[in-house]
């Protein structure tokens, strides 16, 4: 199977379990979707991505949030998202 990347956070999706709702072909990963595979809100995804970066990269929450927002702004799901 070709490795797809989540259009919300950029995570590689290699196995069926990686895709939102367990549906191969879903454009979003398990972390960016609800239990049936619908993409979560921008704020929910940003919160989860921020925590992931802070934990995995040893960043402060503030720096992780800035990086997460910057990375998300380049992805299809959030390209048109307006900052508050």
Image (cartoon, grey):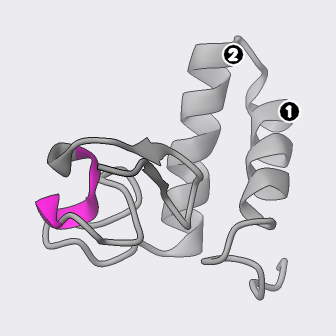
> Which one is earlier in the sequence, the residue at label 1 or at label 2?
2
Instruction: Provide the residue span drawn in magenta.
Output: 18-23
Image x and y of residue 47, in percent: 57, 50
Indicate the secondary structure of the residue bearing disc 2.
helix
The numbered disc on residue 63 is: 1
Q: Foreground: 74 or 25?
A: 25
Q: Which mark is residue 80?
A: none
Q: Which residue is mark 2?
A: 57
Q: Residues within 10 Å of mark 2 (few under 14, many from 20)?
A: few
Reply yes or no: does residue 45 show up in magenta.
no
Q: Position of residue 35 (x, y in %)?
A: 15, 64
Q: Is residue 19 magenta?
A: yes
Q: Please give left or right for residue 35 compared with residue 27 in the image.
A: left
Numbered-mark total: 2
Q: Is residue 66 left or right of residue 13?
A: right
Quarter assignment of residue 37? bottom left
Q: Quadrant of residue 61?
A: top right
CA neighbours of label 1 inside 10 A, class few (<14), some (14 to 19), many (20+): some
Residue 66 in the figure: left or right of residue 47: right
Query: Regarding mark 1 in the picture, which secondary structure is present there?
Result: helix
- Residue under the point 69% across and 15% down: 57
Where is residue 22, by image quadrant?
Answer: bottom left
> Do tag 1 and tag 2 residues touch (Cβ < 8 Å)?
no
Instruction: Residue at 21%, 64% (x, y): give it.
Output: 24
Q: Position of residue 71 (x, y in %)?
A: 78, 52
């Amino acid at each position: 199977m070709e490795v797809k990347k989540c259009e919300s956070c950029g995570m590689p999706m290699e196995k069926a379990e990686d895709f939102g709702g367990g549906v191969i072909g879903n454009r979003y990963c398990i972390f960016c979707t609800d239990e049936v595979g619908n993409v979560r809100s921008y704020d929910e995804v940003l919160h989860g991505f921020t925590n992931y970066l802070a934990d995995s990269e040893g960043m402060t929450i503030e720096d992780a949030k800035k990086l997460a927002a910057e990375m998300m702004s380049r992805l299809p799901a959030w390209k048109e998202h307006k900052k508050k």
